[in-house]
Image (spheres, helix red, strand yellow):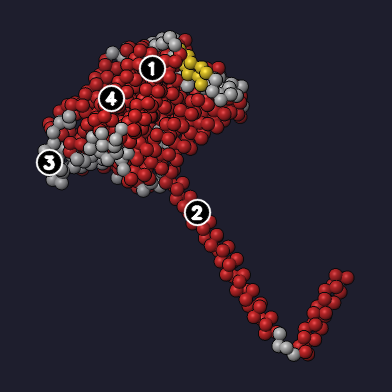
Amino acid sequence: MSGWILLLPVVIPAAAAVLIFLVPKNAWAAQNALALLASAGTLALASALFGKDAAFTVRWAGFGMDFDLRLYNFSSFIILAIAAFTFLTAVYSSVFMKDAGRPRQFLGFTLLTAGFAAGAVLANNLVLMIFFWEGLLATLFPMILAGGNKASPTAVKALVLNGVADLCLMLGAGIAAWLSGTLAMDRINLPVGGFWGGFAFIMMMTGAIGKAGAMPFHSWIPDAAADAPLPVMAILPGSLEKLLGIYLLTRVSMDLFRIEPGSGFSLMMMIIGSCTILFAVLMALIQKDYKRLLSYHAVSQVGYMILGVGTALPIGIVGGLFHMLNNAVYKNCLFLTAGSAERQAKTTDIRKLGGLGRKMPVTFVCFLVAAASISGVPPFNGFFSKELVFDAALETNAVFFVVAALGAFFTAASFLKLGHAVYFGKANEDAPRDAVREAPWPMLVPMAALAFACVLFGVYNPLPLRGLIEPVLGQRLAESAAGLPRNWALAAVSVVILGLAVLNHLYGVRKSGKASGASDHIHYAPGLKTVYGWAEAKLLDPYDVGMKLANGASAGLLAIDRAIDWAVARLTAAAAGLVSAGIRRAHTGRHWMYVLWTLAGAAIVALIFAGVGK
């Protein structure tokens, strides 16, 4: 196979994006056709490249900075997933984005994102990888801005948070290259012992989890749910950013550095994953908006992936990667169902929705399958990947298993509330009065395909595990994780957790009198009410807290600047004026007065010299 073919997953979507920007703004049909053809062609190419080994290297900028691409089992799997989700999003957007404010901007930058993502995955040189990685940062900003000018604060927030994570990645990559003496990623395998090795790992890990949307780099995602077009949420935090972030985290932990189970770095990743699971799912639980609820789950589910990879155990890494794939499938599907509800019912406020199950049966079934998957209901795909993560977490430390189990409980509770409020019962009186119908078929086909994958990857999990995930570990994996759960006791615990979530939902509905209030008894519980109040006021958001501190510091520095300006421009001038006026009064024109001033001055000088002499 010619190495030149590795350029095509990058060039095809990028070239199509340029053509879309050259097409007249109002030529929606041409823009849409270009997006569909390019994404379909890239998917066909990625399918043909899957499972192949290839390399492409040319001199680029000297000093070891070669244009070096490498295709192997892991990268071929990820670019196939990127191409598949990009194509499904393009099909869905062919209807959803037609009447949106900036459809050309969305389509063009979506294809550019797909090209940069493929480049970042194929890159085998640290500098080249960072080049493509920063391209993703450049496209993130305009994709969010496709929601209109109101989205500009969120776009800036996303740019800052991701930029900080990317700076950490660049610093870590530079140190790793210095320690190893090479920029070729397949030739780097460093210990994390010593200050610089550990620091380089932490920096690169930070860049990876920041891209994946883990805490504390997450807070732009719920804001984007309200401001950005729905397909942006499906393609970025819903799928591509998880694929890229966890891909890099796995490579950093397995290949570039050697992380051992039970080590301090392993525990650090597990703690980050556990905190992300619990804190984000608690915020998802209380949301009253369809898209914001999903956005917090997009953050929470990253925690399971980081937890699994962080165990450094083969079964945990397999579970984390399997959950990465499963999350991209069911979370993309869930966001697409939210888009259908938004387009057809004109709102995503779950307090105003109700009874959509009868009016939008296909959307409802797709939601039901995806919600069962993310909640860990057997035999859907999410159940099997969570069981693998649970198994590895319990083998490391029971505390991490307890946190993961609590996350599963609150996840199920969230989706029981969401499904009950939106798809069952009756809409409130202030709900939209227009007749609600099922979404058009181009929006239904991607949802149905993803829902089918949720079933297939669960019922027949050897397909993704043996075909996609396990080859990544190679000789590290002693036995296959495919099939039924290895630990039936943990599986039984998971089923009990789901049962408790159902009981909690029934209690919450009975107590509040409505499905949308099913979590109010947790929201307003003693202690939690105060913490939730802080969170909803964004007092726990690192970005907003940082901006308030920066604004406060700016105001303080401005006050100091104005004080110095006043002292120099006004106080000094006023003092000089007073001295000048006094001197003018002293000059009376009388001879005896000048003699007196001269004698007084001489006396002062004599006294000074007399004091110095002593």
Residue receiving disc 4 = 36
Alpha carbons under labels 4 and 2: distance apart: 48 Å
**Residue at (46%, 46%) from the top-left corner?**
546
| Mark 3: amino acid | Asp
Q: Nearer the viewer, mark 3 or mark 4?
A: 4
Q: Position of residue 470 (x, y in %)?
A: 40, 13
Residue 340 found in image quarter: top left
Q: Position of residue 72 (x, y in %)?
A: 44, 14
Alpha carbons under labels 3 and 4: distance apart: 31 Å
Residue receiving disc 2 = 554
Marks counted in the figure total: 4
For the C terminus, give its image quadrant: bottom right
For the N terminus, give its image quadrant: top left
Between residues 554 and 193, which one lies in front from this camera angle? Answer: 554
Alpha carbons under labels 1 and 4: distance apart: 21 Å
Residue receiving disc 1 = 77
Alpha carbons under labels 2 and 3: distance apart: 49 Å
Point out the tag, 3 or 4, that comes first from the N-terminus.
Answer: 4
Residue receiving disc 3 = 434
Between residues 65 and 526, which one lies in front from this camera angle? Answer: 65
Q: Nearer the viewer, mark 1 or mark 4?
A: 4
Q: Position of residue 86 (x, y in %)?
A: 32, 25
Point out the tag, 2 or 3, that comes first from the N-terminus.
Answer: 3
| Mark 2: amino acid | Ser
**Residue 407 relative to residue 197: left or right:** left
**Residue at (27%, 40%) from the top-left corner?**
101
| Mark 1: amino acid | Phe
